[in-house]
Image (cartoon, grey):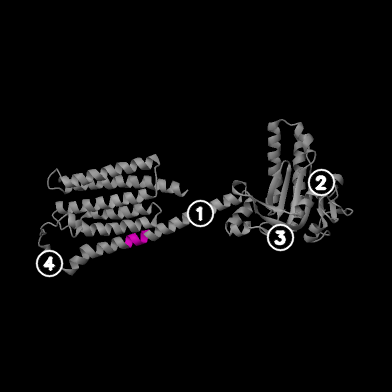
Amino acid sequence: MLRCAELDAEKTSAIIRLVVFLSLALTIFYAAETPVPGDGALAATGLYGLGTALGLLLAWRGIFHPAIPYLFVTFDVILVVAQVLVLARLMGMQTASPFVVPAAALIFIILIHAAMRYRPWLIAYAALLFFVAIELGPLFFPPVAQVAMGGMHSMPHTGMVSHLNFQVLPLVVVALAAFMLFFIAQRTRRLLLASIKHGARAARLSRYFSPNLATRIADGDDDQLLAGRRQSVAVLFVDIRGFTALGETMPPDELSTFLSEYRNRLTQPVFSNGGTVDKFIGDAIMVVFGSPIQGADDAECAVQCALEILDATTRWSVERERAGQTPVAVGIGAHYGEVFAGAVGSGQLLEFTVIGDTVNVAERLERLSREVDSPLVASKALLEAAGGVGKLPIWCSLPPQYLKGHRTAVEALCLTPARD
């Protein structure tokens, strides 16, 4: 984004430089006493024209290097100062007081379009270079004899007042303009970089978290959030019943559409309840509540999400049946406990996930839901963390379950198939 902004600024600067070149050429032509200006003025104007053409070519070819703006600013300032001093000589003025020449105002154009490049130090460099060029310029353009202008120099407006008006005050104005533009460019660049950083951070986090969480995390310290730690979370495993047989009867394009709609419909309840889709595993979805941002109601939100997923599946199945398609059903396993949460892997394979026995139990409970013919099996630990069984739908207690890979029995309850 910053590179595109700088390339766009170079195009604008090239156009402005063209305007400056045309302005200088016209001014020099009309300032001369004869229709043909001096050789020095013509040479300087021609040189500036070549630089202008080069700037236009580089800008429109998209050729950019951080040193190019500094080179062109150096070129602009030196040529403009040289032109101003030449004009002062052509008009019979003192080169020590070049600010009386209207073309000297072109330095403000240079400062302004230096500010357009989002480089505050480029502005400071242009102003400093201008001061140095103005001071050293008379060494290369010796002053001419003072020209009396209607007795102006015999009036009291001489000495210190003249010095302040024609030398000190213009320098102060240029310095103040450069100072203000410096801080404007600095603030603009900071804002642009902050916007780019925030956007990049949110884009990176969106690979791991639901959109609402990605934006929230991007506003904070994502490095700390992504660091590995142990914490309690609620985990849901959602799986389509009979997906293998269903998939075998579908053409590839229809299967792809089916899975896309399945993921879209069932992730909406996850995001609306503040959960995170940890991963898709074929037709299975692993959902986590409480990582990376924990809340007091993580378990309750997980149970509510599971119930909303069942409702969304029921509505979808009814729609499919009305359209003459095969109905669908899902099974859900849910558990609450401690896990390791953090970013694992390296490079492009970096993944934020949760690992631990809690995840395994949730997956085993999803398999158990098929055996007990229930759409949802939840551990007692999850329901108690959610506020107890009493305020939830009708549940049926299961015998203690000895799940594969788990040493002790797990107390679990299943949702009765016929619920209000």
Give coordinates of residue 251: x percent, y percent: 71, 30
- Asked if disc 1 and disc 4 are in contact, CB closer than 8 Å, the reply is no
Decide if residue 163 is in sight here. Answer: yes
* Label 2 or label 3, whichever comes before in sequence order: 3
Q: Which mark is residue 155?
A: 4
In the image shown, does 180 or 247 lie closer to the viewer? 247
* Label 4 or label 2, whichever comes before in sequence order: 4
- In reply to whether residue 180 is colored magenta, the answer given is yes
* Label 1 or label 3, whichever comes before in sequence order: 1
In the image shown, does 67 or 323 lie closer to the viewer? 67
Q: Which mark is residue 367?
A: 2
Which residue lies under the disc numbered 3? 231
Decide if residue 303 is in sight here. Answer: no
Tell which tag, 1 or 3, sits nearer the viewer: 3
The CA span between labels 4 and 2 is: 103 Å
* Label 4 or label 3, whichever comes before in sequence order: 4
Left or right, residue 310 beside residue 163: right
Residue drawn at x 31%, y 62% is 175
Q: Secondary structure at mark 2?
A: helix
Query: Where are the magenta residues, as a range?
Result: 176-181
* Label 1 or label 2, whichever comes before in sequence order: 1
Amino acid type, label 2: Arg
Using a 10 Å C-alpha cutoff, classify the residue at mark 3 as few (fewer than 14 neighbours), some (14 to 19) or many (20 or more): some
Tell which tag, 4 or 2, sits nearer the viewer: 2
Q: Which mark is residue 195?
A: 1
The CA span between labels 1 and 2 is: 45 Å
